């Protein structure tokens, strides 16, 4: 059973097509990193899943049921942009109102629990308007956690946070996936942070899902490469380009060979063929960010979804 | 209850959903100064109207009000009004009510509460119903403070209190019942214009004053056919009212409330919320 199954989803805003036949599959229990450029359709997709927007076409199924069913909606927690809180009320009151809306029994106990999960138990009496951005985001997550959701949809919860805020948020999200046993969809531009928590990824471009993969598959896609420096880089690159399928120079003037090759063999090959001395050599893996940039440039992913 | 891989899916009942939403709305209502300000305005307005008329010359005072209960309702169902005395009565509560509902719903959108609401199990008709009931309650409360203010100011200005008690009760009851219909109209208007609550306020004000119905009455005359409109029935609940007037108000309010809640629900369902 998949937590989310979207097929051929389309959404237009006037003449602008925001989603163009988007497909998305989020397995139950996954932490799904939803990646894409600004305007690629991430937030639109999330708002459609949450029922805030009306699609022009396509289907959205949550846990095998139509996304509009009240019983499914009761099991969804959402943070889209800013949490919907009353600024003059305290954090506690805002939480209690949401608990009342959801018809939660033992509301006080439940609110205490979620505030503790998001490390906000000491700030419950603060007025919402006096909270920092990081606190507000965590309050939004706490509100989304009320009612023990099976699916949590978080729209860019990390963006705009300082380093400490990001660390706390990361811990909170890991805690949630461990203790709440829910499926989490997180969109973010901070790919380095996402890489630390996501179990699955979806990459969207121009309103279409261009790749979906597990963290393991991404790990395989983020291939190992050999990076080297030599005193004759242009000749070395040309030579290596004839032997290996993909050779590039990165922003630090390292020649990268994207292939399964031993560094010693490369050193020996360059010396034998070009009499070139390798001054520096190491093996490394491309990061999620590099992989993403590569995809956005039009590079092909192994898990690319065929239209 | 249905299950999917260990998950329990329980569809919350209408009562449970409404109870939760009404709980939040009424908590907010009782914790916002806006409500008390409008209650105060509703109490002060009759005093201002009667005092204003009393401060004029004796002839003018007589032409405006010769009975304290005229501050609450007109003697006859007058759709065409000739002076402020025939117009200025408890119906003015429906103008303040419209403004209050517009500000309240505008705040729902501004704060993101609507967004938070519709991502949960809350249905669109729940929102329409909850806001209509909240608005009706607010306007009913304003009717009572208006009554209180009217009685006090009538006593203060020395007006007569002679009245047919049954008709007076029917008039007040009719106007309180009409609060429901007016609240549904205002909620509907605010659903159409959503976050642009300046437009909603202006439109609620215009409709609340009854100008369209007064205009129609000026063209077609003082006919009971105008009772099909909210303002018409509100006027019909006057000091010559009887049980029929209450029944008409009840039917009118119920029909328009149903129409506006159904139309509002359709609009909310067909349009993007946020």
Image: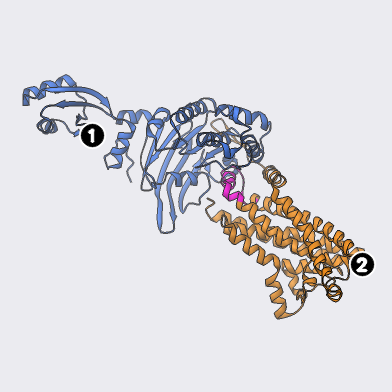
Question: Gap in Å between the C-alphas at discs 2 and 1?
Answer: 93 Å
Mark 1 is surrounded, within 10 Å at the Cα level, by few (under 14), some (14 to 19) or many (20 or more) other residues, namely few
State the blue chain. A
In the depicted view, which residue is nearer to us: B106 or B236? B106
In the picture of the structure, the residue carrying the numbered disc 2 is B160
Q: Which mark is residue A251?
A: 1
Q: Is residue B256 left or right of residue A82?
A: right
Residue A119, x across and y down, in percent: 55, 27
Location of residue B221 by image quarter: bottom right
Q: Which residues are magenta?
A: B107-125
In the depicted view, which residue is nearer to us: A220 or A287? A287
Q: Which mark is residue A268?
A: none
State the orange chain. B
Residue depicted at 40% across the width and 54% down the height = A17
Tell me whether marks 2 and 1 sit on the same chain: no
Chain assignment, label 2: B
Location of residue A70 by image quarter: top right
Residue B90, x across and y down, in percent: 79, 63
Specify the principal SS of the magenta part.
Answer: helix
């Amino acid at each position: 059973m998949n937590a989310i199954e979207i097929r051929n989803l389309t959404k237009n805003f006037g003449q602008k097509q925001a989603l163009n036949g988007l497909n998305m599959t989020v397995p139950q229990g996954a932490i799904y990193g939803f990646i894409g450029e600004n305007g690629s359709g991430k937030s639109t997709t999330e708002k459609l899943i949450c029922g805030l927007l009306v699609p022009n076409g396509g289907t959205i199924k949550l846990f095998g049921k139509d996304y509009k069913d009240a019983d499914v909606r009761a099991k969804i927690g959402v943070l889209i942009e800013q949490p919907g809180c009353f600024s003059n009320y305290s954090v506690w009151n805002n939480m209690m109102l949401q608990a009342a809306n959801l018809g939660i029994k033992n509301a006080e106990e439940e609110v205490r629990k979620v505030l503790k999960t998001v490390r906000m138990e000491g700030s419950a009496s603060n007025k919402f308007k006096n909270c920092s951005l990081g606190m507000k985001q965590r309050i939004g997550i706490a509100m989304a956690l009320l009612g023990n959701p099976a699916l949590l949809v978080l729209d860019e919860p990390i963006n705009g946070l300082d380093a400490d805020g990001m660390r706390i948020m990361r811990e909170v999200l890991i805690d949630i996936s461990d203790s709440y046993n829910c499926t989490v969809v997180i969109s973010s531009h901070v790919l380095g942070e996402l890489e630390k928590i996501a179990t699955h990824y979806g990459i969207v471009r121009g309103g279409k899902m261009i790749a979906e993969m597990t963290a393991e598959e991404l790990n395989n896609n983020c291939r190992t490469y050999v990076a080297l420096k030599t005193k004759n880089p242009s000749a070395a690159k040309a030579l290596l380009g004839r032997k290996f399928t993909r050779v590039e120079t990165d922003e630090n003037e390292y020649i990268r060979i994207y292939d399964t090759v031993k560094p010693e063999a490369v050193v020996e090959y360059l010396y034998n063929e070009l009499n070139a001395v390798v001054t520096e050599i190491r093996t490394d893996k491309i990061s999620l960010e590099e992989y993403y940039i590569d995809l956005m440039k039009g590079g092909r992913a192994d898990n690319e979804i065929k239209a | 209850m249905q299950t999917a891989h260990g998950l329990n899916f329980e569809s919350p009942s209408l009562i449970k959903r409404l109870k939760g939403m009404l709980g939040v709305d009424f908590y907010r209502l009782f914790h916002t100064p806006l409500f008390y300000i409008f209650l105060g305005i509703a109490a002060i307005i009759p005093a201002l109207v009667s005092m204003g008329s009393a401060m004029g010359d004796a002839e003018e005072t007589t032409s405006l009000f010769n009975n304290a209960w005229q501050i609450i309702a007109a003697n006859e169902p007058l759709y065409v009004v000739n002076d402020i005395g025939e117009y200025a009565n408890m119906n003015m509560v429906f103008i303040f009510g419209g403004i209050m509902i517009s500000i309240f719903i505008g705040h729902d959108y501004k704060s993101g509460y609507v967004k938070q609401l519709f991502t949960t199990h809350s249905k669109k008709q729940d929102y329409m119903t909850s806001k209509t009931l909240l608005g009706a309650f607010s306007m009913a409360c304003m009717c009572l403070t208006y009554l209180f203010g009217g009685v006090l100011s009538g006593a203060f200005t020395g007006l007569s209190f002679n009245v047919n008690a049954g008709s007076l009760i029917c008039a007040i009851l009719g106007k309180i019942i009409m609060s429901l219909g007016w609240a549904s109209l205002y909620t509907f208007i605010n659903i159409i214009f959503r976050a642009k609550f300046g437009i909603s306020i202006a439109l609620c004000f215009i409709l609340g004053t009854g100008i369209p119905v007064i205009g129609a009455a000026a063209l077609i005359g003082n006919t009971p056919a105008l009772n099909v409109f909210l303002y018409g029935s509100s006027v019909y609940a006057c000091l010559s009212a009887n049980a029929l007037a209450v029944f008409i108000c009840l039917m009118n309010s119920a029909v328009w409330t149903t129409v506006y809640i159904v139309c509002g629900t359709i609009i909310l369902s067909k349009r993007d919320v946020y």
